[in-house]
Image (cartoon, helix red, strand yellow):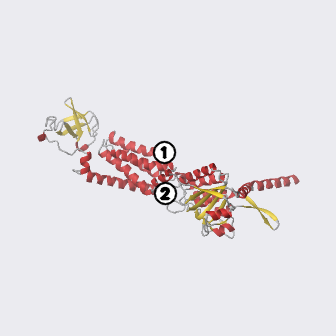
């Protein structure tokens, strides 16, 4: 019995020592921070937490490491963002060897609360708040519980990563969590009760004073300079992260309005290229629109390989429908569906879909991007039809620049073949597909031919010549 008690006591002491390691490491960093000539690196975050923010934080920590910075400050004012992006930043901050400080310069809600909680120290501006980390979709609706469960576990784990710190109570030393995991969980779950703080009916959001009282904030500061003074860093050199031109350009291209415009260019370019084959310029516009649409999303980590391949597959299917299997059938429908699906899923944070419970589909997450793509595609098609009828019909100035509109009349001497070869009304067999041009065989001779009214006619089909103009036999299918 004595040995059993000794073993239990030993393991309890070992556990207490283990959970206090993280707290001791952070305390050591904070104590080592104030020294002469300190290098401080500042990263402002003033937008939603997105994959672009992950790139910024990664570059910031790399530059801070290269500068041998003793402290990295995340100056944040954000209402949340993408879940997996916040998790990536959280992991980087927890693993970073130097002191990290979160300066909540107004708001750290949802994903922002998770990131702030990962920093070694938290300072808040008077009037700032932290919390309200319930996972919601783009419309603000609460996501299914599996999302909430994942977020609760991340908040608890992040709080626990800071370990325990000793406190004296009634002459005894008691080890308490530096950041209470239960409070961190209550920021996500309204049903989590915390004595004297939350009654289990609403999620927790802490003001600056409340955060200090509950151990989620080291102090209040109105500026970075005041924060550094509170942290004991008086002699320092401050470096501030500046986004590169590429970051700004990608951010510009991912503007929702421009994304819709790129979809219009893609649809319009494809439509015009099919209406005027061989011109080339509409195809270039469509390709440029696709590159500007997918490239920034791919760089942001939103577009995956399969989404781009799905879009390209849709284009190939439409081309096959037009030039190989004339008529609007299965390939054309599948091609349109594949294009729309590829464009839409490129706008969706597919990382969220990994946490969808079996049998549940976050319709609100998927429906928005699909509506954007469908509406933009519809607008693009209507504009293309209007533009084509307005400027590429008749004798408009633009039509005269790209299409030969002058009439080469026989009276003016433009006669290259006999005006009438007596073939009108004759029957023949197509020796090549008419797409719409090709060849037919009449009486054992091959003639240049085209489908009447630009109709597509397959190879080996019986046809009747409807007219003979300028050396071309215009044909229609023979009725059965």
The image position of residue 287, as x and y in percent, is 39, 45
The image position of residue 345, as x and y in percent, is 47, 51
274 or 397: nearer the eye? 397
79 or 144: nearer the eye? 79
30 or 233: nearer the eye? 233
The image position of residue 118, as x and y in percent, is 64, 57
> Does residue 373 appear left or right of residue 123 in this picture?
left
- The mark nearer the N terminus, 2 or 1, is 1
Mark 1 is surrounded, within 10 Å at the Cα level, by few (under 14), some (14 to 19) or many (20 or more) other residues, namely few
From this view, report whether residue 426 is shown above or below residue 156: above
Disc 2 element: helix
Q: Is residue 268 visible?
A: yes
Q: Quadrant of residue 425?
A: top left
> Does residue 266 appear left or right of residue 70 in this picture?
left
418 or 392: nearer the eye? 392
Which of discs 2 and 1 lies nearer the camera? The answer is 1
> Does residue 260 appear left or right of residue 451 in this picture?
right
Q: Which residue is mark 1?
A: 306
Tell me the residue at 64%/68% (across/down): 208
Q: Which mark is residue 363?
A: 2
Q: Quadrant of residue 117?
A: bottom right
The image position of residue 121, as x and y in percent, is 67, 60
Mark 2 is surrounded, within 10 Å at the Cα level, by few (under 14), some (14 to 19) or many (20 or more) other residues, namely few
Disc 1 element: helix
Quadrant where the C terminus is found in the figure: top left
> Going by the picture, which residue comes out furthest to the left?
411
> Going by the picture, which residue comes out furthest to the right?
2
Quadrant where the N terminus is found in the figure: bottom right
How many labels were placed on the picture?
Answer: 2
Marks 2 and 1, how far apart in space? Answer: 21 Å
């Amino acid at each position: 019995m004595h040995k059993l008690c000794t073993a239990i006591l030993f393991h309890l002491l070992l556990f207490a020592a283990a959970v206090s390691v993280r707290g001791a490491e952070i305390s050591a960093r904070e104590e080592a921070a104030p020294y002469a000539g300190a290098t401080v690196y500042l990263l402002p975050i003033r937008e939603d937490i997105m994959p672009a923010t992950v790139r910024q934080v990664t570059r910031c920590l790399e530059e801070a490491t290269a500068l041998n910075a003793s402290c990295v400050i995340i100056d944040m004012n954000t209402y949340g963002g993408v879940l997996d992006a916040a998790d990536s930043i959280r992991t980087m901050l927890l693993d970073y060897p130097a002191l990290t400080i979160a300066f909540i310069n107004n708001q750290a809600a949802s994903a922002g609360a998770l990131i702030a909680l990962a920093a070694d120290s938290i300072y808040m501006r008077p009037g700032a708040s932290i919390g309200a980390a319930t996972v919601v979709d783009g419309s603000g609706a609460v996501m299914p519980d599996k999302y909430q469960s994942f977020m609760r576990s991340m908040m608890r784990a992040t709080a626990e990563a800071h370990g325990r710190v000793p406190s004296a109570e009634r002459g005894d030393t008691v080890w308490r969590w530096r950041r209470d995991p239960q409070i961190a969980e209550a920021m996500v779950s309204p049903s989590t009760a915390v004595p004297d703080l939350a009654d289990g009916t609403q999620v927790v959001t802490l003001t600056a004073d409340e955060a200090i009282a509950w151990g989620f904030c080291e102090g209040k500061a109105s500026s970075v300079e005041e924060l550094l003074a509170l942290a004991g860093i008086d002699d320092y050199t401050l470096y501030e992260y500046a986004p590169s031109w590429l970051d700004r350009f990608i951010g510009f291209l991912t503007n929702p309005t421009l994304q819709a415009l790129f979809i219009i260019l893609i649809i319009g370019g494809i439509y015009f290229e099919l209406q005027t084959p061989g011109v080339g310029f509409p195809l270039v516009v469509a390709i440029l629109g696709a590159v500007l649409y997918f490239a920034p999303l791919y760089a942001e980590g939103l577009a995956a390989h399969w989404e781009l391949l799905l879009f390209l597959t849709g284009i190939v299917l439409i081309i096959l429908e037009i030039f190989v299997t004339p008529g609007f059938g299965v390939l054309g429908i599948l091609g349109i569906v594949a294009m729309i699906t590829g464009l839409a899923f490129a706008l969706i944070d597919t990382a969220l879909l990994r946490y969808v419970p079996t049998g549940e589909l976050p319709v609100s997450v998927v429906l928005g991007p699909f509506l954007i793509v469908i509406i933009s595609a519809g607008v693009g098609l209507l504009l293309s039809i209007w533009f084509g009828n307005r400027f590429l019909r008749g004798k408009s100035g633009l039509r005269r620049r790209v299409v030969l509109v002058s009439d080469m009349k026989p009276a003016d001497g433009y006669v290259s073949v006999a005006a009438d070869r007596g073939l009108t009304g004759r029957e023949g067999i197509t020796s090549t597909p008419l797409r719409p041009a090709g060849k037919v065989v009449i009486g054992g001779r091959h003639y240049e031919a085209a489908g009447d009214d630009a109709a597509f006619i397959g190879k080996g089909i019986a046809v009747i010549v409807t007219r003979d103009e300028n050396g071309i036999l215009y044909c229609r299918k023979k009725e059965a």
